[in-house]
Amino acid sequence: MVRRTLIAVAALLVAAAAFAQTKDPLIGSWRLNRAKSTFSTAPPASRTMKFEPAVDGIRHVTETYVNNGSGTDEGVHVAQYTAKFDGQDNVIQGSALDTVALKRVSARVVERTGKVAGKVVETQTWSVSADGKVLTITTKGSNDGQDYSRVEVLDRQ
């Protein structure tokens, strides 16, 4: 009897954890709305972001289509990582950044810090609208001494 009760409790805890992760408003696919976004540098031709649940965090994949304006198509760049919301550095692949760290500020707001060679070079704030349809990402950073900023507005797909 005790064993069945423990198994039932464990199953409920796993189900509750899975349910809590699916309720995260960040989870899903998002597409850049260029008309509502601002960039201090050339904007990408298009960008999509996918956030999937992972243990105590997320898996984040960004696909950016770059056209440099000179007729040379640079194609799709993919950056990806998996991270917990614990402020610890996580390796990012396909990015100028070496690592990223995530911290959840509230149910709809996340702060991301990007580092190169252990030095913070970029900060982002992700904010999901109350209706869950719009993700706004505010970025400030420096690349080889050149400051940049952007406010990306992404629509849920």
Image (cartoon, helix red, strand yellow):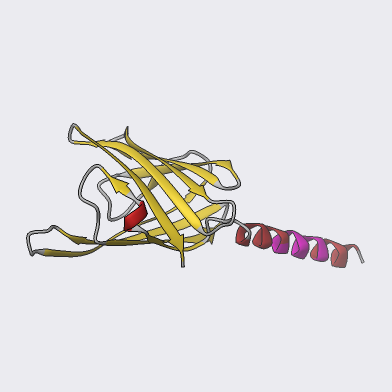
Q: Quadrant of the N terminus?
A: bottom right
| Residue 75 against residue 41 in the figure, above or below | below
Residue stretch in magenta: 8-15
Residue shown at 20% from the left, 50% from the top: 42
Is residue 109 part of the magenta span, yes or no?
no
Q: Is residue 48 left or right of residue 18?
A: left
Can residue 4 be seen in the rendering of this structure?
A: yes
Q: Position of residue 106 (x, y in %)?
A: 59, 42
Can residue 64 be seen in the rendering of this structure?
A: no
Q: Position of residue 15 (x, y in %)?
A: 71, 64
Is residue 10 part of the magenta span, yes or no?
yes
The residue most toward the right is 1
Q: Is residue 16 left or right of residue 104?
A: right
Q: Position of residue 87 (x, y in %)?
A: 49, 38
Asked which quadrant contains residue 25, the reply is bottom right
Q: Position of residue 21 (x, y in %)?
A: 61, 58
| Residue 6 against residue 139 in the figure, above or below | below
| Residue 71 against residue 124 in the figure, above or below | below
For the stretch drawn in magenta, the main secondary structure is helix
Residue shown at 12% from the left, 58% from the top: 69
